[in-house]
Amino acid sequence: MYGFEAMTFNIHGGYLEAIVRGHRAGLLTTADYNNLCQCESLDDIKMHLSATEYGPYLQNEPSPLHTTTIVEKCTLKLVDDYKHMLCQATEPLSTFLEYITYGHMIDNVVLIVTGTLHERDVQELLEKCHPLGMFDSIATLAVAQNMRELYRLVLVDTPLAPYFSECITSEDLDDMNIEIMRNTLYKAYLEDFYKFCQKLGGTTAEIMSDLLAFEADRRAVNITINSIGTELTRDDRRKLYSNFGLLYPYGHEELAVCEDIDQVRAVMEKYPPYQSIFAKLSYGESQMLDKAFYEEEVKRLCLAFEQQFHYAVFFAYMRLREQEIRNLMWISECVAQNQKSRVHDSVVFIF
Amino acid sequence: MEERHLTVDQEPPQEAAEVVNRREVRLEPGAEEKLVLQFMDSLNSYLSFSHSLSSTLGQAWMELASARHSMGTARLNTSLLDLKFHPASTTLKITECDDDAKARFVLRKWVSPEEVGEDEDSNSTKSSVPADDDDEAVRRERAKSLSVFGILIPPKLRAAQQSFERALETLVEMANMQSSFLNSFHQLHQEVEDNKE
Protein backbone atom coordinates (compact mmCIF):
# COMPACT_ATOMS: atom_id res chain seq x y z
CA MET A 1 0.00 0.00 0.00
CA TYR A 2 1.41 3.40 -0.92
CA GLY A 3 2.70 5.26 2.14
CA PHE A 4 3.19 2.15 4.26
CA GLU A 5 6.60 1.13 2.93
CA ALA A 6 8.06 2.05 6.34
CA MET A 7 6.52 -1.11 7.73
CA THR A 8 8.12 -3.58 5.38
CA PHE A 9 10.87 -1.98 3.30
CA ASN A 10 13.70 -2.49 5.78
CA ILE A 11 13.17 -6.24 5.88
CA HIS A 12 14.84 -6.69 2.50
CA GLY A 13 15.99 -3.23 1.48
CA GLY A 14 17.08 -1.59 4.73
CA TYR A 15 20.71 -2.67 4.62
CA LEU A 16 21.23 -1.63 1.02
CA GLU A 17 19.46 1.70 1.48
CA ALA A 18 21.86 2.42 4.33
CA ILE A 19 24.79 1.39 2.14
CA VAL A 20 23.73 3.62 -0.74
CA ARG A 21 23.17 6.59 1.57
CA GLY A 22 26.69 6.02 2.88
CA HIS A 23 28.02 6.02 -0.69
CA ARG A 24 26.10 9.23 -1.36
CA ALA A 25 27.94 10.88 1.51
CA GLY A 26 31.20 10.05 -0.27
CA LEU A 27 30.38 12.09 -3.37
CA LEU A 28 32.71 15.02 -4.00
CA THR A 29 31.71 18.37 -2.51
CA THR A 30 32.11 21.91 -3.83
CA ALA A 31 35.31 22.28 -1.80
CA ASP A 32 36.75 19.17 -3.49
CA TYR A 33 35.89 20.56 -6.91
CA ASN A 34 37.45 23.94 -6.06
CA ASN A 35 40.68 22.18 -5.14
CA LEU A 36 40.59 20.06 -8.28
CA CYS A 37 39.94 23.07 -10.51
CA GLN A 38 43.13 24.67 -9.24
CA CYS A 39 45.36 21.74 -10.10
CA GLU A 40 48.22 22.38 -12.50
CA SER A 41 48.67 18.83 -13.75
CA LEU A 42 47.00 15.42 -13.81
CA ASP A 43 49.36 14.26 -11.07
CA ASP A 44 48.00 17.04 -8.86
CA ILE A 45 44.49 15.77 -9.57
CA LYS A 46 45.58 12.27 -8.60
CA MET A 47 47.04 13.66 -5.38
CA HIS A 48 43.80 15.46 -4.51
CA LEU A 49 41.71 12.39 -5.35
CA SER A 50 43.89 10.22 -3.11
CA ALA A 51 42.03 11.71 -0.12
CA THR A 52 38.65 10.73 -1.60
CA GLU A 53 37.01 7.35 -2.22
CA TYR A 54 38.82 7.19 -5.56
CA GLY A 55 42.20 7.11 -3.80
CA PRO A 56 42.70 3.32 -3.75
CA TYR A 57 41.85 3.07 -7.44
CA LEU A 58 44.35 5.67 -8.60
CA GLN A 59 47.22 5.19 -6.19
CA ASN A 60 49.05 2.58 -8.26
CA GLU A 61 48.77 4.35 -11.58
CA PRO A 62 52.16 5.44 -12.91
CA SER A 63 52.95 8.89 -14.22
CA PRO A 64 52.34 10.36 -16.70
CA LEU A 65 48.62 9.98 -16.23
CA HIS A 66 46.09 10.30 -19.01
CA THR A 67 42.55 11.59 -18.71
CA THR A 68 41.18 8.27 -19.95
CA THR A 69 43.03 6.48 -17.14
CA ILE A 70 41.43 8.71 -14.51
CA VAL A 71 37.97 8.05 -16.00
CA GLU A 72 38.56 4.28 -16.19
CA LYS A 73 39.74 3.98 -12.60
CA CYS A 74 36.96 6.15 -11.23
CA THR A 75 34.47 4.02 -13.17
CA LEU A 76 35.87 0.92 -11.44
CA LYS A 77 34.82 2.45 -8.11
CA LEU A 78 31.25 2.81 -9.43
CA VAL A 79 31.31 -0.77 -10.72
CA ASP A 80 32.52 -2.15 -7.37
CA ASP A 81 29.78 -0.28 -5.49
CA TYR A 82 27.17 -1.54 -7.92
CA LYS A 83 28.33 -5.16 -7.77
CA HIS A 84 28.31 -5.13 -3.99
CA MET A 85 24.75 -3.83 -3.95
CA LEU A 86 23.60 -6.27 -6.66
CA CYS A 87 24.97 -9.33 -4.89
CA GLN A 88 23.21 -8.32 -1.68
CA ALA A 89 19.89 -7.46 -3.32
CA THR A 90 16.77 -9.61 -3.44
CA GLU A 91 13.86 -9.34 -5.80
CA PRO A 92 12.52 -6.95 -6.96
CA LEU A 93 15.46 -4.72 -6.07
CA SER A 94 17.91 -6.96 -7.96
CA THR A 95 15.86 -6.58 -11.16
CA PHE A 96 15.66 -2.84 -10.56
CA LEU A 97 19.45 -2.65 -10.22
CA GLU A 98 19.90 -4.68 -13.41
CA TYR A 99 17.64 -2.30 -15.30
CA ILE A 100 20.01 0.52 -14.45
CA THR A 101 22.77 -1.14 -16.51
CA TYR A 102 20.81 -1.92 -19.67
CA GLY A 103 21.65 1.49 -21.13
CA HIS A 104 25.35 0.63 -20.91
CA MET A 105 24.64 -2.75 -22.45
CA ILE A 106 23.04 -1.07 -25.45
CA ASP A 107 26.04 1.26 -25.79
CA ASN A 108 28.41 -1.72 -25.68
CA VAL A 109 26.44 -3.64 -28.32
CA VAL A 110 26.52 -0.63 -30.64
CA LEU A 111 30.23 -0.10 -29.97
CA ILE A 112 31.10 -3.69 -30.92
CA VAL A 113 28.87 -3.71 -34.00
CA THR A 114 30.13 -0.31 -35.23
CA GLY A 115 33.74 -1.20 -34.59
CA THR A 116 33.36 -4.50 -36.43
CA LEU A 117 31.79 -2.68 -39.37
CA HIS A 118 34.92 -0.53 -39.45
CA GLU A 119 37.15 -3.62 -39.37
CA ARG A 120 38.51 -3.05 -35.89
CA ASP A 121 39.90 -5.78 -33.68
CA VAL A 122 37.34 -7.22 -31.26
CA GLN A 123 39.75 -7.25 -28.32
CA GLU A 124 40.43 -3.55 -28.80
CA LEU A 125 36.69 -2.88 -28.81
CA LEU A 126 36.07 -4.99 -25.71
CA GLU A 127 38.60 -2.89 -23.79
CA LYS A 128 36.56 0.23 -24.59
CA CYS A 129 33.25 -1.28 -23.41
CA HIS A 130 31.67 0.01 -20.23
CA PRO A 131 32.13 -2.61 -17.47
CA LEU A 132 28.54 -2.23 -16.28
CA GLY A 133 27.24 -3.27 -19.69
CA MET A 134 29.24 -6.47 -20.20
CA PHE A 135 27.62 -9.85 -20.75
CA ASP A 136 29.02 -13.28 -21.56
CA SER A 137 28.53 -13.55 -25.29
CA ILE A 138 29.35 -9.94 -26.16
CA ALA A 139 32.39 -10.85 -28.26
CA THR A 140 30.19 -12.97 -30.55
CA LEU A 141 28.53 -9.79 -31.79
CA ALA A 142 31.42 -9.36 -34.21
CA VAL A 143 30.21 -12.21 -36.47
CA ALA A 144 26.73 -10.81 -37.16
CA GLN A 145 26.10 -9.29 -40.60
CA ASN A 146 22.61 -7.92 -40.05
CA MET A 147 20.18 -7.29 -37.21
CA ARG A 148 18.42 -10.62 -37.61
CA GLU A 149 21.71 -12.45 -37.06
CA LEU A 150 22.59 -10.08 -34.23
CA TYR A 151 19.41 -11.10 -32.47
CA ARG A 152 19.49 -14.79 -33.34
CA LEU A 153 23.15 -15.44 -32.52
CA VAL A 154 23.70 -13.28 -29.46
CA LEU A 155 21.03 -11.00 -28.14
CA VAL A 156 18.20 -13.52 -27.83
CA ASP A 157 19.76 -14.72 -24.56
CA THR A 158 20.34 -11.26 -23.13
CA PRO A 159 18.00 -8.87 -21.31
CA LEU A 160 17.91 -6.74 -24.48
CA ALA A 161 16.03 -9.44 -26.43
CA PRO A 162 12.53 -8.01 -25.83
CA TYR A 163 13.67 -4.63 -27.14
CA PHE A 164 14.61 -6.00 -30.53
CA SER A 165 11.14 -6.72 -31.82
CA GLU A 166 10.84 -3.27 -33.40
CA CYS A 167 14.13 -3.26 -35.23
CA ILE A 168 14.69 -6.75 -36.58
CA THR A 169 15.37 -6.55 -40.29
CA SER A 170 17.56 -8.40 -42.71
CA GLU A 171 19.17 -5.21 -43.95
CA ASP A 172 22.91 -5.10 -43.68
CA LEU A 173 24.28 -3.07 -40.83
CA ASP A 174 25.44 0.39 -41.82
CA ASP A 175 25.96 3.64 -39.90
CA MET A 176 22.35 4.82 -40.32
CA ASN A 177 20.79 1.47 -39.41
CA ILE A 178 23.04 1.17 -36.38
CA GLU A 179 22.08 4.63 -35.18
CA ILE A 180 18.39 3.85 -35.59
CA MET A 181 18.93 0.53 -33.82
CA ARG A 182 20.67 2.26 -30.90
CA ASN A 183 17.88 4.77 -30.41
CA THR A 184 15.09 2.25 -30.93
CA LEU A 185 16.64 -0.07 -28.34
CA TYR A 186 17.08 2.75 -25.86
CA LYS A 187 13.49 3.89 -26.41
CA ALA A 188 12.19 0.35 -25.76
CA TYR A 189 14.43 0.03 -22.68
CA LEU A 190 13.20 3.30 -21.17
CA GLU A 191 9.57 2.37 -21.74
CA ASP A 192 10.12 -1.07 -20.21
CA PHE A 193 11.91 0.41 -17.19
CA TYR A 194 9.08 2.91 -16.79
CA LYS A 195 6.45 0.14 -16.81
CA PHE A 196 8.48 -1.89 -14.33
CA CYS A 197 8.65 1.05 -11.92
CA GLN A 198 4.93 1.66 -12.31
CA LYS A 199 4.35 -1.99 -11.39
CA LEU A 200 6.48 -1.57 -8.24
CA GLY A 201 4.19 1.25 -7.20
CA GLY A 202 4.52 3.49 -4.14
CA THR A 203 7.25 6.04 -3.70
CA THR A 204 9.50 4.20 -6.14
CA ALA A 205 6.95 4.63 -8.93
CA GLU A 206 6.36 8.27 -8.07
CA ILE A 207 10.01 9.32 -8.05
CA MET A 208 11.22 7.08 -10.86
CA SER A 209 8.37 8.22 -13.13
CA ASP A 210 9.59 11.79 -12.77
CA LEU A 211 13.24 10.85 -13.34
CA LEU A 212 12.56 8.61 -16.33
CA ALA A 213 10.14 11.12 -17.87
CA PHE A 214 12.88 13.76 -17.64
CA GLU A 215 15.30 11.31 -19.30
CA ALA A 216 12.81 10.63 -22.11
CA ASP A 217 12.21 14.35 -22.67
CA ARG A 218 15.94 15.11 -22.70
CA ARG A 219 16.46 12.32 -25.22
CA ALA A 220 13.75 13.76 -27.43
CA VAL A 221 15.40 17.20 -27.40
CA ASN A 222 18.87 15.77 -28.10
CA ILE A 223 17.60 13.58 -30.94
CA THR A 224 15.88 16.61 -32.46
CA ILE A 225 18.92 18.88 -32.23
CA ASN A 226 21.38 16.22 -33.39
CA SER A 227 19.23 15.22 -36.36
CA ILE A 228 18.94 18.76 -37.75
CA GLY A 229 20.65 18.80 -41.13
CA THR A 230 20.98 15.00 -41.36
CA GLU A 231 19.27 12.47 -43.59
CA LEU A 232 16.92 11.36 -40.80
CA THR A 233 13.35 12.06 -41.94
CA ARG A 234 10.69 13.62 -39.73
CA ASP A 235 8.83 10.31 -39.48
CA ASP A 236 11.97 8.44 -38.46
CA ARG A 237 12.73 11.13 -35.92
CA ARG A 238 9.23 10.89 -34.44
CA LYS A 239 9.55 7.10 -34.15
CA LEU A 240 12.64 7.50 -31.92
CA TYR A 241 10.82 9.53 -29.26
CA SER A 242 9.62 7.59 -26.21
CA ASN A 243 5.90 7.10 -25.61
CA PHE A 244 5.87 8.78 -22.23
CA GLY A 245 7.14 11.93 -20.59
CA LEU A 246 5.94 15.49 -20.29
CA LEU A 247 6.43 16.14 -23.99
CA TYR A 248 4.37 13.12 -25.06
CA PRO A 249 2.45 13.38 -27.35
CA TYR A 250 1.96 17.01 -28.41
CA GLY A 251 5.49 18.18 -27.69
CA HIS A 252 6.85 15.34 -29.80
CA GLU A 253 4.63 16.34 -32.73
CA GLU A 254 6.08 19.84 -32.61
CA LEU A 255 9.67 18.70 -32.07
CA ALA A 256 9.46 16.34 -35.04
CA VAL A 257 9.12 19.29 -37.45
CA CYS A 258 11.77 21.55 -35.91
CA GLU A 259 14.56 22.60 -38.28
CA ASP A 260 16.73 24.70 -35.99
CA ILE A 261 17.57 25.36 -32.33
CA ASP A 262 15.26 28.36 -32.02
CA GLN A 263 12.25 26.29 -33.09
CA VAL A 264 13.19 23.68 -30.48
CA ARG A 265 13.42 26.44 -27.88
CA ALA A 266 9.98 27.76 -28.89
CA VAL A 267 8.50 24.29 -28.36
CA MET A 268 10.21 23.64 -25.01
CA GLU A 269 9.37 27.02 -23.52
CA LYS A 270 5.71 26.05 -23.51
CA TYR A 271 6.51 23.54 -20.75
CA PRO A 272 7.17 25.27 -17.39
CA PRO A 273 9.75 22.74 -16.06
CA TYR A 274 11.91 23.36 -19.14
CA GLN A 275 11.51 27.13 -19.32
CA SER A 276 14.27 27.62 -16.74
CA ILE A 277 16.62 25.38 -18.74
CA PHE A 278 16.18 27.27 -21.99
CA ALA A 279 16.18 30.62 -20.23
CA LYS A 280 19.90 30.05 -19.52
CA LEU A 281 20.69 29.86 -23.24
CA SER A 282 21.00 32.73 -25.66
CA TYR A 283 19.17 32.54 -28.98
CA GLY A 284 20.68 30.22 -31.57
CA GLU A 285 23.10 28.72 -29.05
CA SER A 286 23.10 25.12 -27.88
CA GLN A 287 26.58 24.74 -26.35
CA MET A 288 25.37 25.13 -22.77
CA LEU A 289 22.23 23.05 -23.22
CA ASP A 290 23.93 19.87 -22.01
CA LYS A 291 25.10 21.54 -18.82
CA ALA A 292 21.64 23.04 -18.23
CA PHE A 293 20.05 19.59 -18.56
CA TYR A 294 22.67 18.00 -16.32
CA GLU A 295 22.07 20.64 -13.64
CA GLU A 296 18.33 19.99 -13.72
CA GLU A 297 18.91 16.24 -13.60
CA VAL A 298 21.26 16.54 -10.61
CA LYS A 299 18.69 18.66 -8.78
CA ARG A 300 16.03 15.99 -9.28
CA LEU A 301 18.40 13.15 -8.36
CA CYS A 302 19.40 14.85 -5.09
CA LEU A 303 15.74 15.30 -4.20
CA ALA A 304 15.29 11.50 -4.48
CA PHE A 305 17.32 11.15 -1.25
CA GLU A 306 14.83 13.28 0.66
CA GLN A 307 12.42 10.36 0.95
CA GLN A 308 13.06 6.93 2.43
CA PHE A 309 12.00 3.36 1.70
CA HIS A 310 12.14 3.39 -2.06
CA TYR A 311 14.46 2.16 -4.83
CA ALA A 312 14.96 5.46 -6.61
CA VAL A 313 17.89 6.24 -4.29
CA PHE A 314 19.89 3.49 -6.02
CA PHE A 315 19.16 4.92 -9.46
CA ALA A 316 19.94 8.42 -8.18
CA TYR A 317 23.25 7.33 -6.67
CA MET A 318 24.40 5.62 -9.87
CA ARG A 319 23.51 8.64 -11.95
CA LEU A 320 25.15 11.08 -9.54
CA ARG A 321 28.33 9.02 -9.55
CA GLU A 322 28.32 9.01 -13.35
CA GLN A 323 27.90 12.79 -13.30
CA GLU A 324 30.82 13.05 -10.89
CA ILE A 325 32.99 10.98 -13.24
CA ARG A 326 31.96 13.26 -16.11
CA ASN A 327 33.00 16.24 -13.99
CA LEU A 328 36.38 14.65 -13.28
CA MET A 329 36.83 13.91 -16.97
CA TRP A 330 36.14 17.53 -17.88
CA ILE A 331 38.41 18.95 -15.19
CA SER A 332 41.20 16.56 -16.28
CA GLU A 333 40.82 17.60 -19.93
CA CYS A 334 40.93 21.31 -19.03
CA VAL A 335 44.03 20.80 -16.88
CA ALA A 336 45.76 18.61 -19.48
CA GLN A 337 45.08 21.13 -22.26
CA ASN A 338 46.00 24.12 -20.10
CA GLN A 339 42.53 25.62 -20.47
CA LYS A 340 41.54 26.02 -16.83
CA SER A 341 39.41 29.05 -17.68
CA ARG A 342 36.98 26.65 -19.37
CA VAL A 343 36.62 24.38 -16.35
CA HIS A 344 33.32 25.83 -15.18
CA ASP A 345 31.75 25.44 -18.64
CA SER A 346 30.70 21.87 -17.95
CA VAL A 347 31.27 21.04 -14.26
CA VAL A 348 27.98 20.45 -12.44
CA PHE A 349 28.25 20.69 -8.68
CA ILE A 350 26.28 18.03 -6.87
CA PHE A 351 26.22 19.54 -3.40
CA MET B 1 67.83 32.42 -62.87
CA GLU B 2 68.02 29.54 -65.32
CA GLU B 3 68.66 31.95 -68.21
CA ARG B 4 71.42 33.64 -66.27
CA HIS B 5 72.95 30.32 -65.37
CA LEU B 6 73.04 29.21 -69.05
CA THR B 7 74.54 32.57 -70.09
CA VAL B 8 77.38 32.19 -67.57
CA ASP B 9 78.18 28.68 -68.79
CA GLN B 10 78.34 29.73 -72.43
CA GLU B 11 80.63 32.75 -71.87
CA PRO B 12 84.46 32.16 -71.82
CA PRO B 13 86.12 32.94 -68.41
CA GLN B 14 87.85 36.09 -69.64
CA GLU B 15 84.44 37.56 -70.36
CA ALA B 16 83.33 37.18 -66.73
CA ALA B 17 83.45 40.93 -66.05
CA GLU B 18 81.26 41.53 -69.08
CA VAL B 19 78.89 38.84 -67.83
CA VAL B 20 78.66 40.55 -64.47
CA ASN B 21 77.98 43.85 -66.15
CA ARG B 22 75.39 42.26 -68.39
CA ARG B 23 73.79 40.70 -65.30
CA GLU B 24 73.73 44.04 -63.52
CA VAL B 25 72.11 45.60 -66.52
CA ARG B 26 69.43 42.84 -66.58
CA LEU B 27 68.47 43.22 -62.90
CA GLU B 28 65.55 45.46 -62.09
CA PRO B 29 66.41 48.42 -59.94
CA GLY B 30 65.61 47.65 -56.29
CA ALA B 31 65.34 43.90 -56.89
CA GLU B 32 67.30 43.13 -53.74
CA GLU B 33 65.11 45.40 -51.64
CA LYS B 34 62.07 43.71 -53.15
CA LEU B 35 63.44 40.32 -52.15
CA VAL B 36 64.13 41.54 -48.62
CA LEU B 37 60.60 42.90 -48.35
CA GLN B 38 59.19 39.65 -49.69
CA PHE B 39 61.26 37.73 -47.15
CA MET B 40 60.08 39.90 -44.26
CA ASP B 41 56.44 39.80 -45.41
CA SER B 42 56.49 36.01 -45.71
CA LEU B 43 58.15 35.63 -42.32
CA ASN B 44 55.62 37.97 -40.71
CA SER B 45 52.74 36.04 -42.27
CA TYR B 46 54.30 32.78 -41.12
CA LEU B 47 54.48 34.00 -37.53
CA SER B 48 50.89 35.28 -37.65
CA PHE B 49 49.68 31.96 -38.97
CA SER B 50 51.67 30.17 -36.29
CA HIS B 51 49.88 32.12 -33.54
CA SER B 52 46.55 31.58 -35.24
CA LEU B 53 47.24 27.85 -35.52
CA SER B 54 48.02 27.60 -31.83
CA SER B 55 44.69 29.16 -30.80
CA THR B 56 42.68 27.29 -33.46
CA LEU B 57 44.11 23.94 -32.39
CA GLY B 58 43.51 24.76 -28.72
CA GLN B 59 39.89 25.54 -29.52
CA ALA B 60 39.53 22.39 -31.64
CA TRP B 61 40.85 20.09 -28.90
CA MET B 62 38.55 21.68 -26.32
CA GLU B 63 35.55 21.26 -28.61
CA LEU B 64 36.49 17.62 -29.09
CA ALA B 65 36.73 17.17 -25.32
CA SER B 66 33.36 18.88 -24.97
CA ALA B 67 31.84 16.51 -27.54
CA ARG B 68 33.30 13.52 -25.64
CA HIS B 69 31.84 14.90 -22.43
CA SER B 70 28.45 15.13 -24.12
CA MET B 71 28.44 11.85 -26.05
CA GLY B 72 30.41 9.71 -23.62
CA THR B 73 33.71 7.89 -24.15
CA ALA B 74 31.95 4.81 -25.62
CA ARG B 75 30.62 6.80 -28.56
CA LEU B 76 33.69 8.90 -29.28
CA ASN B 77 36.99 7.05 -29.22
CA THR B 78 39.75 5.97 -31.56
CA SER B 79 38.55 2.38 -31.81
CA LEU B 80 35.58 3.54 -33.91
CA LEU B 81 37.73 5.00 -36.69
CA ASP B 82 37.23 3.22 -40.00
CA LEU B 83 40.14 1.01 -41.06
CA LYS B 84 38.51 -0.07 -44.33
CA PHE B 85 40.22 1.18 -47.46
CA HIS B 86 38.60 4.39 -48.68
CA PRO B 87 39.85 7.33 -50.76
CA ALA B 88 40.99 10.42 -48.92
CA SER B 89 38.43 13.19 -48.84
CA THR B 90 41.13 15.83 -48.46
CA THR B 91 44.36 15.87 -50.49
CA LEU B 92 47.48 17.97 -50.54
CA LYS B 93 49.27 18.59 -53.82
CA ILE B 94 52.84 19.87 -53.85
CA THR B 95 53.97 21.59 -57.03
CA GLU B 96 57.39 23.00 -57.74
CA CYS B 97 57.60 25.80 -60.26
CA ASP B 98 60.77 25.80 -62.34
CA ASP B 99 60.89 29.57 -62.74
CA ASP B 100 61.27 30.43 -59.08
CA ALA B 101 62.05 26.99 -57.57
CA LYS B 102 59.40 27.63 -54.93
CA ALA B 103 57.24 24.76 -53.70
CA ARG B 104 53.50 25.45 -53.62
CA PHE B 105 51.07 23.52 -51.44
CA VAL B 106 47.50 23.21 -52.62
CA LEU B 107 44.81 21.76 -50.35
CA ARG B 108 41.74 20.22 -51.89
CA LYS B 109 39.08 19.57 -49.25
CA TRP B 110 36.05 17.33 -49.16
CA VAL B 111 36.57 15.76 -52.55
CA SER B 112 33.94 13.11 -53.20
CA PRO B 113 35.20 9.77 -54.58
CA GLU B 114 33.77 10.66 -58.00
CA GLU B 115 35.91 13.77 -58.22
CA VAL B 116 39.18 12.12 -57.24
CA GLY B 117 40.19 11.37 -60.85
CA GLU B 118 39.34 14.79 -62.23
CA ASP B 119 41.91 17.28 -63.44
CA GLU B 120 43.00 19.50 -60.53
CA ASP B 121 44.56 22.30 -62.57
CA SER B 122 41.62 24.58 -62.13
CA ASN B 123 42.19 24.58 -58.37
CA SER B 124 45.97 24.84 -58.37
CA THR B 125 46.25 28.61 -58.40
CA LYS B 126 45.01 28.99 -54.84
CA SER B 127 46.88 27.85 -51.79
CA SER B 128 43.76 26.24 -50.33
CA VAL B 129 40.22 25.68 -51.48
CA PRO B 130 37.87 27.47 -49.13
CA ALA B 131 34.96 25.20 -48.17
CA ASP B 132 31.61 26.58 -49.28
CA ASP B 133 29.29 25.85 -46.39
CA ASP B 134 26.26 25.97 -48.67
CA ASP B 135 27.65 23.34 -50.97
CA GLU B 136 25.56 20.20 -50.61
CA ALA B 137 28.41 17.92 -51.67
CA VAL B 138 30.79 19.39 -49.10
CA ARG B 139 28.17 19.07 -46.37
CA ARG B 140 27.61 15.44 -47.34
CA GLU B 141 31.33 14.66 -47.25
CA ARG B 142 31.68 16.32 -43.85
CA ALA B 143 28.76 14.29 -42.50
CA LYS B 144 30.19 11.09 -44.01
CA SER B 145 33.51 11.74 -42.32
CA LEU B 146 31.81 12.05 -38.93
CA SER B 147 29.44 9.13 -39.48
CA VAL B 148 31.99 6.74 -37.93
CA PHE B 149 30.81 8.12 -34.58
CA GLY B 150 27.13 7.82 -35.46
CA ILE B 151 24.55 9.79 -37.40
CA LEU B 152 22.99 11.72 -34.50
CA ILE B 153 26.04 13.58 -33.30
CA PRO B 154 25.98 16.81 -31.29
CA PRO B 155 26.79 20.23 -32.80
CA LYS B 156 29.95 20.30 -30.65
CA LEU B 157 31.53 17.51 -32.68
CA ARG B 158 30.70 19.29 -35.92
CA ALA B 159 32.23 22.47 -34.51
CA ALA B 160 35.38 20.51 -33.59
CA GLN B 161 35.56 19.20 -37.15
CA GLN B 162 35.39 22.70 -38.57
CA SER B 163 38.04 23.95 -36.17
CA PHE B 164 40.43 21.18 -37.19
CA GLU B 165 39.65 22.03 -40.82
CA ARG B 166 40.64 25.65 -40.20
CA ALA B 167 43.81 24.44 -38.49
CA LEU B 168 44.66 22.33 -41.54
CA GLU B 169 44.16 25.32 -43.86
CA THR B 170 46.40 27.40 -41.61
CA LEU B 171 49.10 24.71 -41.72
CA VAL B 172 49.03 24.72 -45.52
CA GLU B 173 49.28 28.52 -45.55
CA MET B 174 52.23 28.28 -43.17
CA ALA B 175 53.92 25.79 -45.48
CA ASN B 176 53.46 28.17 -48.42
CA MET B 177 54.79 31.12 -46.44
CA GLN B 178 57.76 29.04 -45.33
CA SER B 179 58.46 28.05 -48.90
CA SER B 180 58.19 31.71 -49.92
CA PHE B 181 60.57 33.10 -47.32
CA LEU B 182 63.05 30.26 -47.80
CA ASN B 183 63.00 30.96 -51.53
CA SER B 184 63.50 34.70 -50.96
CA PHE B 185 66.33 33.96 -48.54
CA HIS B 186 67.96 31.65 -51.08
CA GLN B 187 67.74 34.28 -53.81
CA LEU B 188 69.14 36.98 -51.53
CA HIS B 189 71.94 34.72 -50.46
CA GLN B 190 72.70 33.94 -54.10
CA GLU B 191 72.77 37.65 -54.91
CA VAL B 192 75.17 38.32 -52.06
CA GLU B 193 77.43 35.48 -53.19
CA ASP B 194 77.35 36.70 -56.78
CA ASN B 195 78.18 40.26 -55.71
CA LYS B 196 81.18 39.00 -53.75
CA GLU B 197 82.53 37.38 -56.89
Image: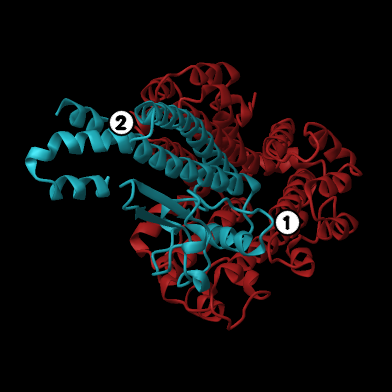
Chain colours: A red, B cyan
In this picture, residue B143 sits left or right of residue A337: right
Residue nearer the viewer, A2 or A346: A346
| Other residues around mark 1 within 10 Å, as few (<14) / some (14–19) / many (≥20) | many
Residue nearer the viewer, A156 or B130: B130
Using the rendered view, name the quadrant where residue A160 is placed.
bottom right
Q: Residue at x 47, y 34 (%)?
A: B53
Q: Position of residue B25 (x, y in %)?
A: 31, 35
Q: Are marks 1 and 2 on the same chain?
A: yes
Q: Position of residue A200 (x, y in %)?
A: 74, 53
Residue A38 in the image: above or below residue B158: above
Q: Position of residue B114 (x, y in %)?
A: 52, 73
- Name the subunit of mark 1: A
The residue that mark 1 highlights is: A228
Q: Position of residue B30 (x, y in %)?
A: 39, 27
Is any atom of residue A334 visible in this view? yes
User: Mark on residue A23?
Assistant: none
Q: What amino acid does circle 2 point to?
A: Pro
User: Mark on residue A64?
Assistant: 2
